[in-house]
Image (cartoon, helix red, strand yellow):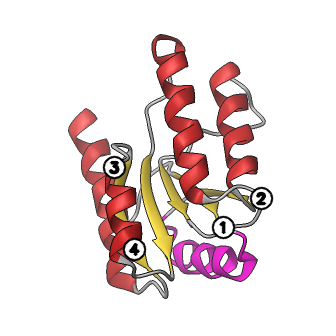
């Protein structure tokens, strides 16, 4: 399933996961461009820079974000809380469309799922290891949204 002009951001301290996703999605040209952040702090900085200068050529607004929750320095949960606050403060100034966020984790804990469900920006919860069906369903959501806007 090809997503035209789509950009994926992977926020995960596991670089192997990033390279596997990138290789899988590059294989069939399903996503055009990729970025990677090692933890929530890097991802928060990424979004702060993006919101402060959306026309910047250095960063591209992601259409889809795969977010791990268990990371050093700043976890996915901490990132989601900080991003939610940032979005509230900058709401009228943000001109980029919000990306689809999918939590991607090896945790299958109901407590984690419940905590994640409290964040309205989360579109789904995917358990590692991902399979083709998981990836394709997340891409289909982005494609459907893009099609409906055109």
Looking at marks 4 and 2 on the same chain, the residue that comes earlier in the sequence is marked by 2
Looking at marks 2 and 1 on the same chain, the residue that comes earlier in the sequence is marked by 1
81 versus 138 height, above or below:
above
Q: Which residue is mark 2?
A: 73
Disc 2: CA contacts within 10 A as few (<14), some (14-19) or many (>=20): few
Give the number of the mark in front: 1 or 3.
Answer: 3
Cα–Cα span, label 4 and label 2? 22 Å
In depth, the one of 65 and 31 nearer the eye is 65
Give the number of the mark in front: 3 or 4.
Answer: 3
- Residue 32 shows in the view: no
Cα–Cα span, label 3 and label 4? 16 Å
Q: What is the x, y in percent for residue 79?
A: 60, 48
Looking at marks 3 and 2 on the same chain, the residue that comes earlier in the sequence is marked by 2
Q: Which residue is mark 3?
A: 118
Is residue 10 in the magenta section? no
Stretch in magenta: 13-30
| In the displayed structure image, the side of residue 20 where residue 150 appears, left or right | left
């Amino acid at each position: 399933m090809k997503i035209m002009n789509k950009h994926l951001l992977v926020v995960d301290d596991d670089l192997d996961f990033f390279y596997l996703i990138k290789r899988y999605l590059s294989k069939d040209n399903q996503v055009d461009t990729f970025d990677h952040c090692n933890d929530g702090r890097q991802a928060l900085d990424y979004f702060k820079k993006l919101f402060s200068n959306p026309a910047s050529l250095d960063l591209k607004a992601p259409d889809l974000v795969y977010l791990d929750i268990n990371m050093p320095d700043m976890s996915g949960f901490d990132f989601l809380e900080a991003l939610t606050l940032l979005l509230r403060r900058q709401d009228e100034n943000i001109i980029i469309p919000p990306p689809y966020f999918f939590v991607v984790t090896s945790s299958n804990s109901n407590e984690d799922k419940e905590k994640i469900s409290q964040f309205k920006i989360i579109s789904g919860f995917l358990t590692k290891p991902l399979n083709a069906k998981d990836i394709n369903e997340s891409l289909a959501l982005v494609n459907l949204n893009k099609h409906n806007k055109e």
